[in-house]
Amino acid sequence: MKFLRIILLIALTGFSLPSLAHEDPDQSGYIQVDGGKLWYRMNGIEHLGIKPAIIVMHGGPGGTHRGLMPYVELADTYPVILYDQLGNGKSAKLVDDINDQSTWTVEHFVKEISQIRAALNLDEVIIAGHSWGGTLSAEYAVKNEKGLRAAIFGSPLISTPQWVADNREWITMMPQEYQDAINKHEAAGTFSDPEYREAESAFYARHMCPGECIDRGFRADAKRGNRTMYQTMWGPSEFTANGTLADYDISPQLHTVEVPVLMICGEFDEAAPKSCKKFADMVPDATNVVVPGAGHATLGQEKDMVIGTIREFLAEKVK
């Protein structure tokens, strides 16, 4: 999942750069979905009806579209749509909207994709998501809806048990003091203890962004993520899942996907490369790519490589 405590990444970088992703959308607004109104933005509107539209799903659960703004660079070739899932960012207008848990289900968030397509009359689409957004991409891909041309699984949550097992293995490679702190406080349920948070931050420095993550100012003046949603659906940290997704696993259905899939993750990713490869091998037509030196925040560390890889994949697979 996309880490919601963004302040860590900012602290790791210390500066920001301008980017094409700050370009104003060609079109933006609200779409009525089950439970409320969802905010979206679109660039590359001149390509509508000519090229499939790329619908981009953010991480979390509880994040916002801002973390995936680099996808806007693909708007020179495709229509690109980013949006805030209901209850997050601009799709949460009131306190009650933010914490209405009736829509906090996999089924609801997958249905949002179909409702976006219907509202914007998108006959052909490419779906793309990172982390929890990769979950939604996988869920939509196994549906094999008419007009789906390709899917991008970026550092995806495919199986919670596998995710947790992989991250427990990463933890065994940390200094003993951090291992002991994590084990002690998880056994006691004292997740807010400073000792636990220090160990958690050390884990993120290794597996969220082990190198230089560049803050390009994507989140400047942005609405914050929904931490309550994250904790309810996932849990207290990236490596501990005790929420509603604790038993989640879409992997048994991956063999049914009929479109080309790009699986891409970082070398030190929370979505561990060995598991991403295993899941990619379950898909009939999948391209598996590992970003050298990167953690979970692949777009923060290696934006040009990630966007370039996506561009090459789509050029080859979507004619």
Image (tube, grey):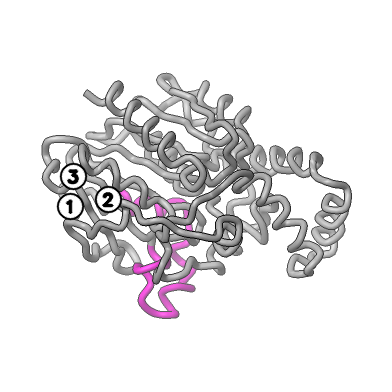
| Kind of residue at disc 2 | Ile
- Disc assigned to residue 81: 2
Q: Count residues near mark 3 (Cα–Cα under 10 Å), then give few for <14, some for 14-19, many for 20+.
A: some
Of callouts 2 and 1, which one flags the residue occurring earlier in the amino acid sequence?
Answer: 2
Q: How many marks overall? A: 3
Residue 278 x/y as whole percent: 58, 25
Which residues make up the magenta segment? 86-113
Residue 7 x/y as whole percent: 57, 64
Seen in the image, is 117 located left or right of residue 90? left
**SS type, badge 3:** loop
Question: How far apart are labels 3 and 2 at the CA level?
Answer: 11 Å
Q: Mark 3 — residue?
A: 122
Residue 225 x/y as whole percent: 48, 66
Are the residues tagged 2 and 1 within 8 Å (C-beta)? yes
Q: Count residues near mark 1 (Cα–Cα under 10 Å), then give few for <14, some for 14-19, many for 20+.
A: few
Seen in the image, is 268 located left or right of residue 263? right
- Disc assigned to residue 120: 1
Q: Residue at x 56, y 56 (%)?
A: 13
Are the residues tagged 3 and 1 within 8 Å (C-beta)? yes
